[in-house]
Image (cartoon, rainbow, N blue to C red):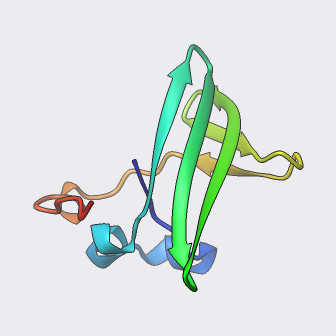
Amino acid sequence: MGLFIIPKADTLNLCRENFNPVRAKIGYYYINSKSIKTKISTIGDCSLFISKKQGEIKGDTIILKDNSNHGNIYIKQIIPKEYLTNWKPDW
């Protein structure tokens, strides 16, 4: 999977460049019934960080928590198909 970090203020004005694969964090996910587990790698400042989160799926919403029980809520948004067309992963 590709995780795109988009500042909350920018979510009202999404554009095609927000979904450029060069900007994505690389990871994978596993879904089992209504639960989800993710593992995402981030490389920066000559180091590698791997975040592991697990959570639950409720309708169109994904709630992910890390080991300290802090988390994020992701709500499905509909974007124009053109924002994603002709992109290819860079990994």
Instruction: From the viewer's perspective, tell me whether residue 15 is left or right of residue 48.
Output: left
Q: Residue furthest bottom?
A: 45
Q: How many marks?
A: 0
Tell me the quarter of the picture where residue 47 sits. Answer: bottom right
Q: Image point 70% across, 34% down: which residue?
A: 55
Tell me the quarter of the picture where residue 56 sits. Answer: top right
Residue 15 position within the rendered picture, expressed as x and y whole percent measured from the top left: 33, 75
- Whether residue 20 is situated above or below residue 31 in the rendered picture: below
Q: Residue furthest right?
A: 68
In this rendered view, identify the residue nearer to me: 79 or 25.
Answer: 25
Residue 34 position within the rendered picture, expressed as x and y whole percent measured from the top left: 62, 19
In this rendered view, identify the residue nearer to me: 79 or 69.
Answer: 69
- Whether residue 64 is situated above or below residue 30 in the rendered picture: below
Q: Image point 54% across, 53% down: which residue?
A: 40
- Whether residue 72 is situated above or below residue 87 in the rendered picture: above
Q: Residue furthest top?
A: 33
In this rendered view, identify the residue nearer to me: 59 or 44.
Answer: 44
Instruction: From the viewer's perspective, tell me whether residue 8 is left or right of residue 21.
Output: right
* Residue 6 visible at all: no
Residue 61 position within the rendered picture, expressed as x and y whole percent measured from the top left: 60, 38
- Identify the image quadrant of the C terminus: bottom left
Residue 71 position within the rendered picture, expressed as x and y whole percent measured from the top left: 78, 51
Instruction: From the viewer's perspective, tell me whether residue 74 is left or right of residue 87.
Output: right
* Residue 15 visible at all: yes
Q: Residue furthest left?
A: 86
Q: Image point 14% across, 58% down: which residue?
A: 85
In this rendered view, identify the residue nearer to me: 73 or 77.
Answer: 73
